[in-house]
Amino acid sequence: MLKRQPILLQGAEMLVLFAILIAIDHGLSHGDAYTGLNPNPYWLPVLVMAIAYGTGMGLVAGAIASAIWLCQANIWSGSADHLEQQLRLSIQPMLWMVAALVVGEVTASRRNRIADQKRQHQAMLRDREKLAKVMARLADTNRRLQVRIATEQRTVVEAIAAGLDLSGSDSEHQIDAVARMIALVARTEDFTFYDVRGSQVVARFCGRATSGQARDLTRSMLAEAMFAKPRVLQNDDPADQAILAQVGAIALPIMGARDQLVGIIIIHNVSRVTAAYRAQLLQVTDLLGKSCALFGREPAFHAKWQMPEEKVA
């Protein structure tokens, strides 16, 4: 693993190495830059710096070692040729500088290769995380689709059963059929159906999960708002929050054949109201509004909507 340290710390390490070698040379040797030793100990800082920090520090160490060598080396041997003496004096510094350059470049290449491998490793980790997220989303989508397919198959069967009960003559079964149809579209059993007769808004039936809801909303803010301007009220709309406080999450008006308010469906608890969800609910209210007989507008069907107290929470 290559070291990455400040330039001052690198220089300090290099100077410590040279100081130790100089102290050993003057204390235990002859103070001649280890002229009689081969290989020369000053190779150590040159190679260490080049291997650890690259070409730059290796060349600096080579330059310092060369300066010490030129100042302290004792290689004169009497009447030897002057050019030969110069060659013998300069060959060691040249070897240090060439070695520092070669080893430093190899170190730089290795450093770049390691950096590239690190970047590739990080990219692979990011790709693996993305792949894991994609797989998790696919698994969740698959699970949702399986649930949706099973639910839609069950919904079709329940809708057919509710339609058959609605066509029967028993008033209890017909009311339960309407309640089941509302529950299928609302995807919850926590709702209440209110019948509107004149200025009265009275609960007629509710879902199986509904409890503690008001039986009579005649004097409520919701009834006043619906009589003034029938529209869908949602608690995620700041303008409707006060009206729906302690009543429910969404209120849907049912308009009769003559565009008069004939009923209100209140869904008390729903996690999220999407545009598609709201459109489905409006289709149900439109269908119910066209069924005048179901809402007791015909005398023959009036009695079956007079629900006993226990049918309303």
Image: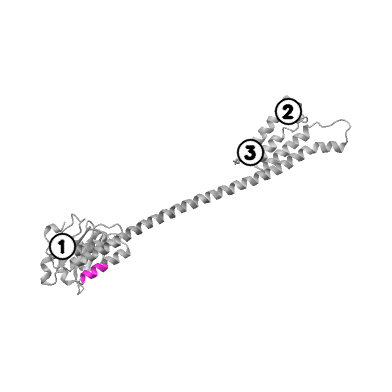
Instruction: Give residue 252's quadrant in the image.
Output: bottom left
Whether residue 285 is in magenta: the answer is yes
* Residue 25 circle label: 2
Element carrying mark 2 = helix
- Mark positioned earlier in the residue sequence (3 or 2): 3
- Mark positioned earlier in the residue sequence (1 or 2): 2
Left or right: 310, with 276 as reference point: left
Residue under label 3: 10
Q: CA distance from mark 1 to mark 2?
A: 108 Å
Q: Does residue 185 appear in the picture of this structure? A: no
Instruction: Give residue 190's quadrant in the image.
Output: bottom left
Whether residue 190 is in magenta: the answer is no
Magenta-colored span:
282-289
* Residue 204 circle label: 1
Q: CA distance from mark 3 to mark 2?
A: 23 Å
- Residue type, numbered disc 1: Arg
Q: Mark 1 against mark 2, which lies toward the viewer?
A: 1
- Residue type, numbered disc 2: Asp
- Residue type, numbered disc 3: Gln
Residue in the foreground of this view, choosing between 160 and 52: 160
* Residue 287 circle label: none
Q: CA distance from mark 1 to mark 3?
A: 87 Å
Left or right: 143, with 48 as reference point: left
Image x and y of residue 155, in percent: 27, 62
The N terminus lies in quadrant:
top right
Q: Main secondary structure of the magenta part?
A: helix
Q: Residue furthest top?
A: 28
Q: Does residue 43 appear in the picture of this structure? A: yes
Element carrying mark 1 = strand
Residue in the foreground of this view, choosing between 4 and 2: 2
